[in-house]
Image: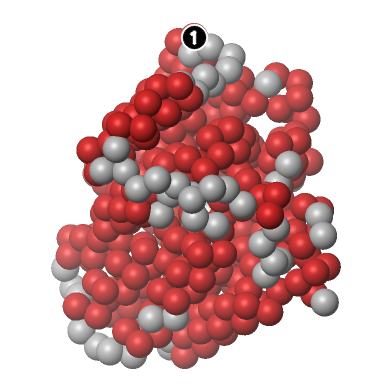
Amino acid sequence: MYRKFFAQNSARKIPFFLTLFFFWSSADIVLTYLLPVLIEDTVSNLLLLGIIVSAGSFMAVIFNMITSWRFAGRHYRFFYLAGFMIALLVPIFLFIPGVWPLLVLTILAGLYYEMFSFGHEEFLGNHVPHREHVKTSGMIMLVVTISSILLPMIIAPSLEQRSFDLSFFLYISFAVIGLLFFILFAPQRSKDVQHAPSKMLSFVNELKIWKLLSRNTYPVLLVMVILMILDAIYWTLGPLLTVYYAKQSPELAALFVPVYIIPGLAVTYYAPKWADKFGEVKAMLFSLGLSGIFLILFLLSEDLHILLALGFISGFFSSLSYTLTEGLFAHLIDRLNEQGTHLIGLRGVAIDLGYIIGPFLGGLMAEYFSIKDGFAYTGIIMVIAALYLFFKYGRTIRLQQIELKKIIEED
């Protein structure tokens, strides 16, 4: 009965998808906050801590290549089921002490995140109407924002006391309930949305496809990398800036990271309007550049109130740019049909690169300049990238479908 209800049309599939997204993303947010504390309790060397945290992103890049090569054209049900299976392996290693279990944990986290991301993009690109892509991306941003605000508030007090039971319980609960929800309520596969099985390609030809798609879609890929660098820098330098300003006002200083997240609540309304007014590519670049400009203004003030206001405005435009970028990816995956999995893999690599580069870049800038100025110099990078892409790149993204077909037919 419930499967039939969710399968009847895309408008009913979207609530199912958003609910499913809430469960797996909430589990991931809990683990994201938990892992650094677990690692810090186990190792005293901060460099080793950074290597362990980065391991998941490095492995995810490799996993992306394998997944887009071996599982091209698979249905989102396959990716979600695989993601939940991997996610449920995590609790085994949560209770094992030592460095190696923590390394395995970060790798598993990277693997299940990529599988969920493949399922997420396959659903958005192939099961949601073109006109709904930006709006649905905005609703996804809303779900992530709410979880990112509420869950840290729930688990932070226990983590400060080095008590991990609540975090373990929440992670396991979200993962298990998410899997049960998926099994019970996933819409039946419809004949009209199934693709023909994709031909297995050689690894060399997979790399050729990646090269071709990278050349066609590099503006969207580059924006995604930069937005992920910004996100990683916020989560790396944000807590340090909070500690620095806590001497002046602990209550206000604690808002520094939240003011970056909270604007995501509003982009569901504004993203479609900007896309209609400017076109999706221009709107994506305008919002990226504006976000960077407000970060650059960090150079002009030391006042915490001004920094919070600038961070809030910058966070609004970066959230807007991210939502528009995800909408563009969904359009492109839709246009590629069963070959869209290759682009999903490239999107994942862009995200992973951002999370590999971001922490190192943030630490480097904070070391040689200051924590606050690290945000400003990140803003300069964002503005330069937005201007470059705006003047260099055209209005539409052209996919070379004929050349792509030739590569596929080579095998």
Q: In which image quadrant can residue 114 be found?
A: bottom left
Residue density around tag 1, few if under 14, some if 14–19, many if 20 or more, within 10 Å: few
Residue closest to the eye, 87 or 303? 87
Disc 1 secondary structure class = helix
Residue closest to the eye, 357 or 176? 176
Q: In which image quadrant can residue 49 be found?
A: bottom left
The reply to whether residue 228 is in sight is no
Q: Point out the image quarter for the N terminus.
A: bottom right
Q: Residue at x 73, y 42 (%)?
A: 129
Q: Considering only vertical position in the picture, is 213 above or below 397? A: below
Residue closest to the eye, 69 or 158? 69
Q: Residue at x 28, y 89 (%)?
A: 96
State left or right for residue 334 relative to residue 113: right
Q: Residue at x 61, y 44 (%)?
A: 125
Q: In which image quadrant can residue 254 be found?
A: bottom right
Q: Point out the image quarter for the C terminus.
A: top left
Q: Considering only vertical position in the picture, is 170 above or below 114? A: below
The x, y position of residue 389, in whole percent, is 47, 17
Q: Considering only vertical position in the picture, is 363 above or below 401? A: below
Identified by mark 1, the residue type is: Phe
Q: Which residue is mark 1?
A: 391
The x, y position of residue 51, in whole percent, is 21, 60
What's the colour scheme? secondary structure
